[in-house]
Image (tube, rainbow, N blue to C red):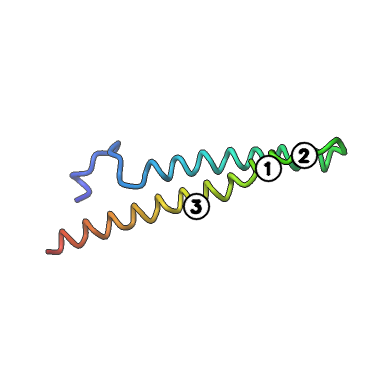
């Protein structure tokens, strides 16, 4: 089965994993920006920056959904190959 798979073919769930990674890293940057004033002794950022920090969790959940979708597709293919 490996010899029939194209190296650049998109598997089910790949887009969700990529989108989740992008959202996660955007949340990580927002978290670093939000925490920086605490160490620098400057004025804290407004509340919306703390909300943007929650994107880390959202990205993690989206990527996890992509992994689960990929696992389900792999199990479906294995079940079809067995029959």
User: Which residue position holds label 1?
Assistant: 31
Q: Residue furthest front?
A: 47
Task: Please determine whether, in this image, residue 25 is positioned above or below residue 62.
Answer: above
In screen coordinates, is 41 left or right of 80? right
Which disc, if any, is residue 36?
2
In screen coordinates, is 70 left or right of 34? left
- Picture coordinates of residue 2, whole percent (x, y): 22, 49
Task: Give whichever of discs 1 and 3 has the lower sequence position.
Answer: 1
Determine whether the residue tagged by mark 1 lies in a helix, strand or loop: helix
Q: Are marks 2 and 1 in contact (CB under 8 Å)?
A: no
- Picture coordinates of residue 37, whole percent (x, y): 81, 38
Q: Residues within 10 Å of mark 1 (few under 14, many from 20)?
A: some
Q: Residue at x 40, y 53 (%)?
A: 67
Task: Give whichever of discs 2 and 1 has the lower sequence position.
Answer: 1
User: Which residue position holds label 3?
Assistant: 61
Q: Residue at x 75, y 43 (%)?
A: 35
Q: Residues within 10 Å of mark 3 (few under 14, many from 20)?
A: some
* Real-space CA distance between mark 2 and mark 3, rounded to the nearest whole angstrom: 25 Å
Q: How many marks?
A: 3
Q: Residue at x 31, y 57 (%)?
A: 72
Q: Quadrant of residue 24?
A: top right
* Real-space CA distance between mark 1 and mark 3, rounded to the nearest whole angstrom: 17 Å
Q: Nearer the viewer, residue 51 or 68?
A: 51
Determine whether the residue tagged by mark 2 lies in a helix, strand or loop: helix
């Amino acid at each position: 089965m490996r010899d029939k798979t194209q190296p650049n073919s998109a598997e089910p769930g790949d887009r969700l994993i990529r989108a989740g990674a992008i959202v996660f890293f955007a949340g990580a940057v927002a978290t670093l920006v939000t925490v920086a004033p605490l160490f620098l002794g400057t004025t804290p950022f407004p509340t919306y920056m703390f909300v943007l920090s929650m994107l880390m969790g959202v990205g993690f959940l989206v990527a996890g959904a992509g992994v689960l979708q990929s696992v389900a597709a792999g199990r479906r293919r294995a079940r079809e190959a067995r029959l």
